[in-house]
């Protein structure tokens, strides 16, 4: 890897970390979701600073070409992100379902109490 490319990648990763931290400060991202992105950024920064890690990982996994290893690990990371987001959406879907049921029960109870109150006022 050339020094120019390495410096460019380091600058890009640092900018990415800056964006993540800004979103966290502006409360556009929750901390628990930001941690996955920060972990990925730290990994990318480590790879940008020490590109020999990719060569070592390529040999460890048994992949022939280092660029294929980069794509392989990128795809694994994307699967991790999709799995995390799917879990979050499933959890939120369950919460919305329960909240809808609770809201319906509360509305029914209010209607019943209003009916009782009207009956008492008629007497």
Image (cartoon, grey):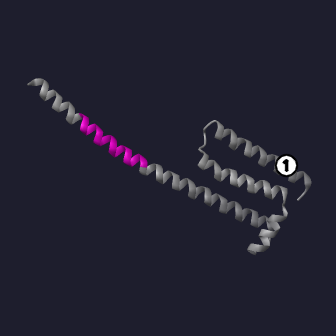
Residue, x 56% and y 58% (percent of image)? 83
The residue that disc 1 covers is: 8
In the rendered view, tell whether residue 43 sits above or below residue 117: below
In the rendered view, tell whether residue 22 sits above or below residue 82: above
Residue 25 appears at what percent x and percent y? 65, 37
Residue, x 70% and y 60% (percent of image)? 74
Q: Nearer the viewer, residue 64 or 91?
A: 91
Residue 99 appears at what percent x and percent y? 38, 44
In the rendered view, tell whether residue 23 sits above or below residue 1: above
Task: Give the SS element for disc 1.
Answer: helix
Q: Nearer the viewer, residue 21 or 11?
A: 21
Residue lying farthest right? Answer: 3
Residue, x 60% and y 39% (percent of image)? 28
Left or right, residue 65 beside residue 82: right
Task: Say if residue 74 shows up in the picture.
Answer: yes
Q: Which residues are magenta?
A: 95-110
Which corner quadrant holds the C terminus?
Answer: top left
Task: Say if residue 63 shows up in the picture.
Answer: no
Residue 117 appears at what percent x and percent y? 17, 29
Left or right, residue 48 beside residue 23: right
Q: Quadrant of residue 82?
A: bottom right
Residue lying farthest bottom? Answer: 62
Residue, x 52% and y 52% (percent of image)? 88
Does residue 122 show up magenta in the picture? no
Left or right, residue 97 beside residue 68: left
Which corner quadrant holds the N terminus?
Answer: bottom right
Main SS of residues in magenta: helix
Residue 100 appears at what percent x and percent y? 36, 44
Label 1 packing within 10 angstroms: few (<14), some (14-19), many (20+): few
């Amino acid at each position: 890897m050339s020094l120019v490319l390495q410096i460019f990648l380091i600058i890009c990763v640092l900018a990415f970390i800056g964006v993540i931290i800004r979103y966290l400060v502006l409360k556009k991202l929750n901390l628990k979701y930001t941690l996955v992105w920060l972990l990925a950024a730290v990994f990318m920064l480590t790879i940008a600073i020490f590109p020999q890690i990719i060569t070592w990982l390529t040999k460890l996994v048994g992949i022939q070409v280092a660029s294929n290893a980069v794509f392989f690990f990128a795809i694994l990371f994307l699967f991790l992100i999709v799995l995390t987001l799917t879990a979050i959406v499933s959890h939120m879907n369950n919460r919305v379902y329960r909240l809808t049921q609770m809201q319906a029960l509360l509305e029914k109870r209010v209607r019943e109490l209003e009916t009782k109150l009207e009956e008492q006022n008629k007497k």
